[in-house]
Image (spheres, rainbow, N blue to C red):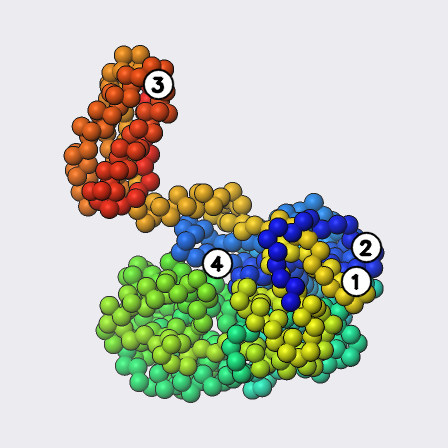
Amino acid sequence: MNSITAHLPAPGPLAADTIRVVALGGLGEVGRNMTVLETEGKLLIVDCGVLFPEEAQPGVDLILPDFSYIKNRLDDVVGLVLTHGHEDHIGAVPYLLKLRGDIPLYGSELTLAFVAPKLAEHKLAAPPMHMVSEGDISDMQPFSCEYIAVNHSIPDALAVFVRTKAGKVLLTGDFKMDQLPIDGRITDLRAFARAGEEGVDLFCVDSTNAEVPGFVTAEREIGPVLDSVFAKATGQIVVASFASHVHRVQQVLDATAKAGRKVAFVGRSMERNMNIASERGFLSFPADTVMGVGDLLNLPPNKRVFMATGSQGEPMAAISRIAHREHRTITASQGDTVIFASSLIPGNENSVFKVINQLMRLGATVVHQGSSKVHVSGHASAGELLYVYNIVKPKNVMPYHGEVRHLVANGALAVQTGVSARNVMIAEDGVVVDVRGGFARIAGAVPCELVYVDGDSIGEITEDELHDRRVLGEEGFVSIYTVIELTTGTILAGPTIVAKGVAEDDSVFDEILEQVTDVLLETASKPDVTSYELQQAVRRTVGRWVGRKLHRRPMIVPVVVEA
């Protein structure tokens, strides 16, 4: 297989008979999916999602694809195709539209309905929005896009078959092959076969579950498990899931009705998305099943179900605030049941288990994927991927949507079905794949960094700043303030030490003050000494003492003011 190389050169000019494919997110990670196709001087974008931060990225709200590759070519973009409505595929759309607000959007009814309120939140005017369905074809010269129904954990998902004069690319988006889906809408393997018969020059395939053998369990098998958990629960029930996982919410609503309970949606995104899904017929339930949070709290605990956000342990999401008794209305206590009805995104394990442990401290019974079948994946496992490779018979394959281990496993599956190893492109974000005359090759790489969003700040946070934040959060902060007259070496004020998160009682630092004073006087006595040298002397002295005495490595900020 063609592997990633450490230092790929910049790609050369694109020949007229070539189609270029560049992922600006989603390769080497689970999230921020965005793929750019180029031919004849025009660009087509497929998906534009976000990645959610891990514990090692404190203070970061979202992580965006790196738009720098296309920033100076936005006028060449003929359209943005959205395969489905999950945040990792649509969450970055407003940030792209802030760069060019009239990029035409193409997506299914539910997908575009989920995008609209995001644009409103960012105070953006809606661009041209084209609602498409399976079987439709969009002419965005020089690209022609045909949409194919695929089954996923959210309704109305689509694959896209892109035809150009230079070649044809089939992108699955996120998909699985559930043969008994909740909404009756299966992955259209006949359309995949037709694309294969026509000829697929590059097949971009969902890799998230490529390491998992066999076939994904049917979504509807969760229903009986939820029914059983609901039947045993004696107190209130809280279910945590993704705010866009409509199929899972439908199962919870069904279990709620069977148990004679009522449900309330908790979390702004959960409430908004489920209202949208219900209005458009993608979610159904008896009229009296759903209530507001306030009304539900008037019922006894054994009649309540809260459908909440926060299945990944996000600190500001509803389930985390409930666990830490920080939610303004909902509490958890002895006898309650909490269900985590989503998979763990890699990197979020610690955050989720911290929330689970806290809920259990409160006396709640916690049910999760590791203890009961309350979640099935929305992504095709190895058996399904083999099936699809045999149907499509692509000339070249580029696994996408996954970490490197997922991409490699997916590529190996393609090879098992007869795709030549040299025609499998294992790429990461920014790697350029050119397809010409039915042959694909890695043609170089473009800059592609993690772009952090922190409040109104976009792309301004550096890795060094994140390191400083991690140190502050884990080891604490020590500031030493001194006013000194350099000409005489006289200390006029201080040294004063202020510490945060280092010791329970700051008086412990009284022990080091005399030593800091001696070091300052000794250093100040040297000829032509600078305030920087004084600061460094203080930093070394305090750092050694804190490490030896308190066994910590805090951020140390000495401030020496010249009088």
Q: In this view, does 497 lie above or below 155?
A: above
Mark 4 or 3, closer to the camera: 3
Between disc 4 and disc 2, whose residue precedes? 2
Q: Quadrant of the C terminus?
A: top left
Left or right: 505 in relation to 233: left
Q: Which mark is residue 52?
A: 4
- Check disc 3 and give the amino acid type: Val
Say if residue 233 shows up in the picture.
yes
Between disc 4 and disc 3, whose residue precedes? 4
Tell me whether circle 1 and circle 2 mark residues in contact (CB < 8 Å): yes
Q: Element at badge 3?
A: loop
Between disc 1 and disc 3, whose residue precedes? 1
State the residue in front, 526 or 259: 526
Q: Which mark is residue 436?
A: 1
Q: Quadrant of the N terminus?
A: bottom right
**Within-10-Å neighbours for mark 1: few <14, some 14–19, many 20+:** some
Mark 4–mark 3 Cα distance, whole angstroms, equals: 47 Å
- Check disc 2 and give the amino acid type: Ala
